[in-house]
Structure formats: structure tokens, C-alpha cells
Image (cartoon, rainbow, N blue to C red):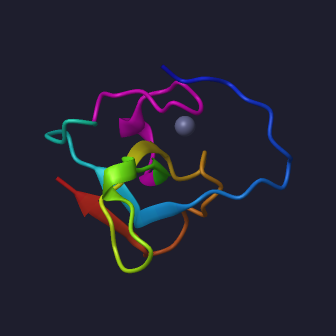
Amino acid sequence: MIIPIRVPATAQLHTEGGIRQLGPGHPLFSALCPACGSHLEDQPITLVYIGSHPEDRKESGWMTAAAVAVHAACAGLSTTGEHIQVTP
Ligand SMILES: [Zn+2]
């Protein structure tokens, strides 16, 4: 469930893994972007960090966390250029 919230227009988010174009065999290919509601297959995507289980949190280093896939453009990232990776 996606919960709409009001945020400052200058709100920042945290993305991971760069920008990727999903291939037809990817499990998220026909999923919907939670930000705009259209299919993820239509445009390059990125992963937005949304939180972590309290037991997985650390003071430093790396930890396991959760993310949702959204269109890179919906996350405010530029989708022009050669930096887009293809994920089969
Ligand atoms: Zn979108």
C-alpha cells in the first residue's frame, strides 16, 4: 500500500543502484511505479530506500534495507545519457 503524504517541495530522497532499464524477463517489468501508477517497463527505473528492520541497523558500514522501484524520472533523476544500465 502506498500512502500519499505531503512533503516540502524541496524534499530529498535517497536512491541506490543507479538507473536501469528493465528487460522483459525481469520480475518488476510489468509492475506499476508507485509514484505515477504507470508500468515500470515504460522508462528507466531506480530503487528508492524506504527503511530497514531495526535488527539490521548498524552505527556504520553497510546494512540490509528495503527499497521500492520507481521510474528514475519520478525520483527526480535525469534519464538522458549513457549511464543507464540494462537489467535483463
Ligand atoms: Zn513513475
**Relative to residue 4, is residue 62 drawn left or right?**
left
State the image coordinates of residue 8 (x, y, percent, origin top left).
Answer: 86, 46
Please determine whether, in this image, residue 25 is positioned above or below residue 64. Answer: above
Q: Out of 7 and 86, give the one closest to the viewer.
A: 7
Q: Residue at x 30, y 28 (%)?
A: 30
Q: Out of 29 and 11, give the one closest to the viewer.
A: 11
State the image coordinates of residue 60 (x, y, percent, origin top left).
Answer: 42, 79
Please determine whether, in this image, residue 24 is positioned above or below residue 49. Answer: above
Main secondary structure type of the part rendered in magenta: loop
Q: Out of 58 and 69, give the one closest to the viewer.
A: 58
Q: Which residues are magenta?
A: 29-47
Q: Residue at x 73, y 29 (%)?
A: 5
- The quarter of the displayed image where residue 83 is located: bottom left
State the image coordinates of residue 42 (x, y, percent, origin top left).
Answer: 42, 38
State the image coordinates of residue 23 (x, y, percent, origin top left).
Answer: 22, 47
Please state the quadrant of the image where ligand 1 appears: top right
- The quarter of the displayed image where residue 16 is located: bottom left
Whether residue 11 is in magenta: the answer is no
**Relative to residue 37, is residue 29 drawn left or right?**
left
Q: Residue at x 19, y 36 (%)?
A: 27
Whether residue 46 is in magenta: the answer is yes
- The quarter of the displayed image where residue 36 is located: top right
Q: Residue at x 39, y 69 (%)?
A: 58
**Relative to residue 73, is residue 6 drawn left or right?**
right
User: Farthest residue in the top direction?
Assistant: 1
User: Farthest residue in the right direction?
Assistant: 9
Q: How many marks?
A: 0
